Image (tube, grey):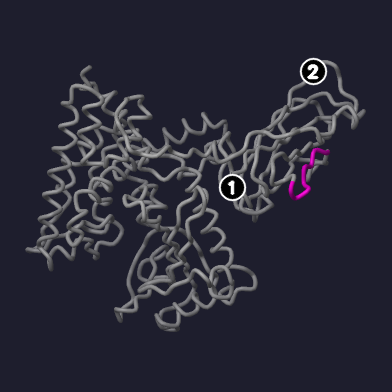
Amino acid sequence: MLINERQKLASILQTSADKLDIPDYVYEDAILKYEDVGEHLAADDSDLRDYKPQIYVQGSFRLGTVVHPYDRGDEYDIDLVCQLEMRKESVTQKDLKAKVGDRLKKREDLSKILQPSRRCWTLDYPAEIGMPGFHMDVLPSIPNEERKPTGILLTDTELTKWQKSNPVAYAEWFKKRMEVIFRVKKAALAEAMLASIEEVPDWRVKTPLQRCVQILKRHRDIHFEKKPDVKPVSIILTTLAAHAYQNEEDIFDALTGIAKRMSNFIENRKGLWWVQNPVDEGENFADKWNDYPDRRNAFMTWLQKVSVDFENVSKAETVADGLIMLDESLGRQTMDKVATELGVKRESLLPAIVSTASMVPALGDESHVLSPATQFQLVPVPQYTAKISAGVYFKKGSKKGRFLWPMSDKPVPKSVWLKFTLKTNVPEPYSSRWQVVNTGEEAMRDNQPRGDFYNADNPDKHVRWESTAYRGTHWVEAFVLNSAGVCVARSGKFLVKVR
């Protein structure tokens, strides 16, 4: 079977990028970790409060270009900016770093995993069952008055001058490079998730540009595995790829086009090689190339290999042959996963992959659940409909709780808040009653089976808030009562899987 048809080739690349990407449940765990740290830094009792701290993520997590660690011993890196409203004349780099570090040390659990680094403070979260470890770099910063409104100045223990950065503006530029296809994909994802476009987090959307950057990163990691001294930094790769992207919808067209055009955006200014920071014309991402020419030579050689490798895949005679050709470029482990996903048989030494579904016990014993008939009268055949939608929040309360993502059939982590909203065509006035049921070993062991009925948290909006505390499959059901107290509609069970 020839695979010169773009659709088949694109499926290999698309699936490869999927397998390189950070799993949703790991991304969600990362979000909770940096939300937690951010809340601690900016809390009402924080010594930093007077400096109006702004906490936000930067780097690949912000750009949506995270890749699964190539080395199984590696851990994911998260870069978190802690920006304080201070003028550089009023504070030294040393004092700024100390202020942020002192606040982090005030929480015992964070203090135990805290280490000082050159530019930042690093929190080393150990791996847990079913979850990888994380390195979270918390970068102290202050506003850069010369680059308003989003420019910042960073500390550096090895340099006397403040270091400039503008991660927010860079991320906006990167998003602008793919905005056409990004809007299309976000709208399609919102429709698939039965959510509004506003409810779909940007990190859930993956464009061909983001996928290509992930593939290029992995190709680079493998190519330079034995020569790390000349390995190109991600910011150069990402910037050139974004410049070269032309909003192609097909991932193969995007990747081959990007590989061919990336070198067009490398400048030579009076004998100096330049890859300009697109949001700061004075910053050269490739300044080290001028001090170490081998780095540029290695980059250009690698870029040529990228083009050759992916062009060769298009000439493979079978899907299996195409996967074999990518073993060297993207890694055998990754391609084994791709083969499994595409239903292509081949020998593999990979252990079985643990899915998020297997991390959650199935629905357990429900003998403790109260019958709705013991609580209110039910009409034999409901005339109206009722449906529940739900969202995941960092804390209870729509205004200060920080919406994270809309709920789907995927498992959710512990220690988050869920906001359930009732939608019904029952005419006003009506009220809602909510049945909340826990099942599973953890809930039973803690004597929290639930199964009874509750009023809405806000009767006018027919909303119910619940937190996730116990691993297992649980459920919530909403009952709509008319003015006479008769149940005229019910939503059916809304399953909640907590990993």
Q: Residue at x 72, y 36 (%)?
A: 476
Q: On the image, numbered disc 2 is attached to which residue?
A: 383
User: In 3D space, how far apart are the residues under numbered discs 2 and 1 (Cα atoms)?
Assistant: 36 Å
For label 1, the crowd category at 10 Å Cα-Cα, with few meaning under 14, some 14 to 19 and many 20 or more, is: some
**Count of picture labels:** 2
Q: Position of residue 205 (x, y in %)?
A: 43, 39
Check the image and name the residue furthest to the left.
Answer: 271
Q: Residue at x 58, y 77 (%)?
A: 47
Q: Position of residue 448 (x, y in %)?
A: 77, 46
In the image, which residues are magenta? 445-452
Q: Position of residue 433 (x, y in %)?
A: 82, 36
Is 485 magenta? The answer is: no
Question: Does 180 appear above or below 384?
Answer: below
The C terminus lies in quadrant: top right
Q: Secondary structure at mark 2?
A: loop
Q: On the image, numbered disc 1 is attached to which residue?
A: 413
Amino acid found under the numbered disc labelled 1? Pro
Relative depth, front residue between 8 and 257: 8
Q: Position of residue 278 (x, y in %)?
A: 27, 56
Q: Earlier in the sequence, mark 2 or mark 1?
A: 2
Q: Are marks 2 and 1 in contact (CB under 8 Å)?
A: no
For label 2, the crowd category at 10 Å Cα-Cα, with few meaning under 14, some 14 to 19 and many 20 or more, is: few
